Image (cartoon, coloured by chain):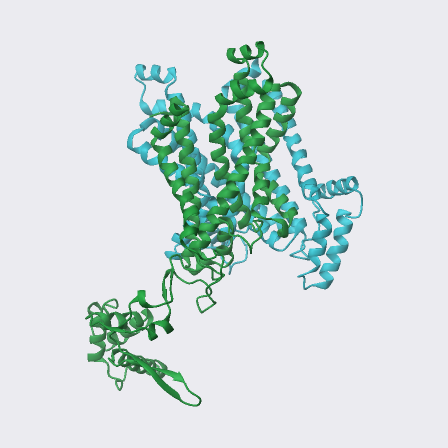
Chain colours: A cyan, B green
Amino acid sequence: MKGYAKYFRKKIVWFIVTFIAAFLLNFFLPRLMPGDPVAAIVARMAQGQSNATGVQAIYKQYTELFGTNKPIHEQFFLYVKNVFHGDFGFSFSQYPRTVANVLKTSVWWTLGLQFPAIIVGFFIGNILGVLAAYLRGGYDKALMPVSIFVSGLPAFGMATILLVIFGVTFKLLPTSGGYGFDLIPTFSWTFIWSVIVHFQLPFWSIVLIAIGGWAIGMRSMSIYELNADYVKYSRFMGIKDTKIIQYVFRNAMLPQITGLALAIGTMVGGALVAEIIFSYPGLGTTLLSAIRGQDYPMISAATLIITIMVLVANFAIEILYGFIDPRIKAAQSD
Amino acid sequence: MKNTLQQVFHSGKFVVGFTIFTFILLMVIIFPLLVNTPPLGIISQGSTQGSFLPPGLYVNVYDSIATTPYTLNLDDAAAKRIASRLSPADRTAIKEWLVKAGIPENEIDTTDTDTLLDLWASNYDPGKEMSGMTFAKTRYYQRLDASLQGLLSTQGLTIAAAGTDTLQAAGSVAQSDYVNVTEVPNVRLLALGTDNFGRDVLPELVSATGTSLLIGLVAGVIATTIGLVLGLAAGYIGGVVDDIITFVNNLFIVIPSIVVLILISYSIGQEKRGPVTIAVVIGLFGWVWTAKAVRAQVISLRNRDHVNMSKLSGHPIAMIIFTDILPYIASYVIMAFILQISTAILSEASLSILGLGPKTSSTATLGLMMNWAMVYMAPSLGKWWAYMPVIVVIALVSFSLNLMNTGLDQVYNPALRE
């Protein structure tokens, strides 16, 4: 355990560095644009808002909170201070709710949907991939083109197809929302059942997309592994095929886990758009309504939270990887 | 070079992918030459259907009446006519009445119009008292019966023109009258119907595919160029340059690109977001994987004998890079470029669905078409033609590019060959 300290320290430092970089990007990117986007946003905000007192209050609060008239470094420190207090200001489009209040609920929906979906897709895909490499023949020939096709589909495409087949044509599953529109969130069986039913289509659309990509990657990895000496040796020893597949699976998995750490950002991005198709009450849908409502504080906060989620997931996978990969353990004990 | 090409075209996967992609590309180029309609022209007006019109051959009714009719005596014409006018609700209502009148339920088939109407004609009696039937329902059956009588009549219709205060017969249409569609001056084939704005989906889709491919190409070229230059610099120069580039590279690998794209697209503002602007933005943040792969390759090449020989011979750096390094990494770069195109097309689609795509009115892209179909709830309304073709095209483009990539991978990585 002691030997891991160096590895973990390195990973924690990297996590903090990426976090700071993401934070800086989130602050500076919109402000780097030619013209003053903040002023433009405030100007845009004034039109199309029916609630005059709301506009006034937001305007005042916005200038105070983000200090748009102050120099940029002061604005930045103000922003840092506010973010660490969880204060993202009022929402333009959902005044008088605050951004933090709106996002507090949607974060959990997104986490609850994407975390299981990405993990399940990862494992199913990898198992299919190692089988394709091992069995070859017809199974491989059928799986590969299907995987390439499915992994090339955007998540929203798969979402729409599932929505139309199971939601609209056969009316088996609900097509939108996170729970029945006639229910109030409580801990009752009807509510939990409704959540489970509404969960199915978004969940499977993300899982199916993920499966293809992982299966392709795992197949190539496993083919390399199958040519390794230990596989030939095991065969000569008369070890059962199922056992050999397990060895190959474990070894080929390692690069795949690194792959998961690297791909998680892209996957979350795709899944956010899939949420929109089902109007799932997560961050994706919130982001869409924020963009439609020209709700700048909300967009900024939502993107920051998405980035943090991805960074944390990435960090967690790296730490897990440290425990799984024997080479890291060996390197630490030197 | 010739050898490599031959090898590449021996790979089945590459050839299939290449064929699909070339077909799509040819469609995009040839279609506008054959069909001379503005792709974004609004042609249909809102009706009870919204502006979504289902795919089909649209024949002008006014012109059809004026065209010389031909008489065709087709046996099943009357039956088809009635079948198409009898709604499913009416059919179940007829069945309900017949069951109540004592006809066994298994003898009634609501899909068989002929026997259903026969049963109805022989059994229906408007004066008959049915138990438990409201007055309104009784009247409904009387009206239904009357309309069926009208359907069954063999008389034609008279066309009337509005006079000053009376109607004047201007012509008549018999039930056995037919027009030859080729003689009707105004016929429009809407192969994929119209979208929510009332635009013909097929030309729009072709134009959108073209724009999306352009976005993919521009973004791919930008991303590959940046990735190549940075990868070469990091790998060949090494030292501090390498450290800085690798640091930035690793940063952008973990920070989700969609977040960066959302922030930038939003900041650019609706007015300035053209397809090319979006492509440039996507390209500017899509180089990370190329740079990483190129750097790794260059590092492994840097100390090979032939490179050292070149250095000893005093060749300038540019020459070493062009003759001793680039040819070795060309296959990787091409594969990365192909992937960039498909990623960029998907990124544009994602951004458009989020409402951050190119300016909406003047261009069509695959993402924008998808976005409008979603905004107008085409999936729940069952207007499949507004979004399904878009998904199919996106899937085909991305499938063909990925297939080409896998094919190339198998050619250059012999371990993966079958």
Q: Is residue A222 above or below residue B376?
A: above
Residue depicted at 31% across the width and 22% down the height: A240
Residue depicted at 45% across the width and 27% down the height: A253
* Relative horizontal placement of residue A234, taking residue A307 as reference (left or right): left
Observer-nearest residue: A216 or B203?
A: B203
Residue depicted at 65% across the width and 56% down the height: A93
Residue B103, quarter of the rendered image: bottom left
Residue A121 position within the rendered picture, expressed as x and y whole percent measured from the top left: 44, 38
- Image quadrant in which the N terminus of chain B is located: top left
- Image quadrant in which the C terminus of chain B is located: top left
Residue A77 position within the rendered picture, expressed as x and y whole percent measured from the top left: 76, 40
Observer-nearest residue: B194 or B307?
A: B307
Residue B400 position within the rendered picture, expressed as x and y whole percent measured from the top left: 40, 38
Observer-nearest residue: B219 or B246?
A: B219
* Relative horizontal placement of residue B205, taking residue A238 as reference (left or right): right
* Relative horizontal placement of residue B308, taking residue A59 as reference (left or right): left
Residue farthest to the bottom, as pictured: B165
Observer-nearest residue: B364 or A169?
A: B364
Residue A124, quarter of the rendered image: top left
Total label count? 0
Instruction: Tell me, yes or no, if residue A58 can be seen here.
Output: yes
Residue B144 position within the rendered picture, expressed as x and y whole percent measured from the top left: 31, 79
